[in-house]
Image (tube, helix red, strand yellow):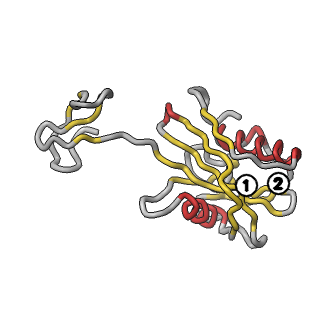
Amino acid sequence: MIHCSTCGSKVNTEIPPGDHRPRQVCPSCGQVHYLNPKLVVGSLPVWEDKVLLCRRAIEPRLGFWTLPAGFMEADETLAEAACRETFEEACANIELQGLYTLVNIPHINQVHVIYRARLLDTGFHPGEESLETRLFSEEEIPWDEIAFRSISLSLRNFFEDRRRGCFTQREETLLPGTAHLP
């Protein structure tokens, strides 16, 4: 941040009184600007024994496969964001079956939240941000073409839990590295 979003003055980086981290502080109006993580929310939609994936039509990772997910909007709940993103990216109608994975990615200031979901029908098709949508069995998943580590992690956990017959809510932290590799 260069300029204060409140008054437009140039901001300084300093530790405000009572804080312990450097923040962007406006010397003119005193506004402290906090950099908070962004929430990426989506779903892991299932039809029978297959998972719905979307081939990305946008960067980052154009042409790679992912679960339908995206940035949460300010006026919605996590569940609403998961349903909206699934509809926007895959034109898919789903029923959420519970929070499944929460993946902390502190080095890029993001938290990825994925819900398990049941597809209500097979009338899905690519939305504006997808080149293609398709159902995959576990054996068909293009693991080398999965866009993000958080998605690979969620998919691997899902198939492991499905084999065990018990789905467990999971929380993971991804450390710095190549963010797209499984």
Marks 2 and 1 sit apart, C-alpha to C-alpha, by: 7 Å
Horizontal and vertical percent position of residue 145: 73, 42
Q: Where, by quadrant of the figure, is residue 57 drawn?
A: bottom right
Q: Which residue is mark 1?
A: 53
136 vs 113, nearest the viewer: 113
Label 2 element class? strand
Of all residues, the one furthest to the left in this rendering is 28
Q: Which residue is mark 2?
A: 136
Residue ID at (70%, 67%): 95
Q: Are marks 2 and 1 in contact (CB under 8 Å)?
A: yes
Relative to 1, 80 lies left or right:
right
Category of crowding for the residue at label 1, using alpha-carbon neighbours closer than 10 angstroms: few (below 14), some (14–19), many (at least 20)? many
Quadrant of the snapshot with the N terminus: top left
Horizontal and vertical percent position of residue 92: 68, 68
Mark 2 or mark 1: which comes first in sequence?
A: 1
Relative to 153, 50 lies left or right:
right
Residue ID at (64%, 36%): 172
Q: Where, by quadrant of the figure, is residue 115 drawn?
A: bottom right
Q: Give the numbered dot on residue 173.
A: none
Relative to 160, 113 lies left or right:
left
Kind of residue at badge 1:
Leu
Horizontal and vertical percent position of residue 39: 50, 48
Kind of residue at badge 2:
Phe
Horizontal and vertical percent position of residue 144: 76, 38
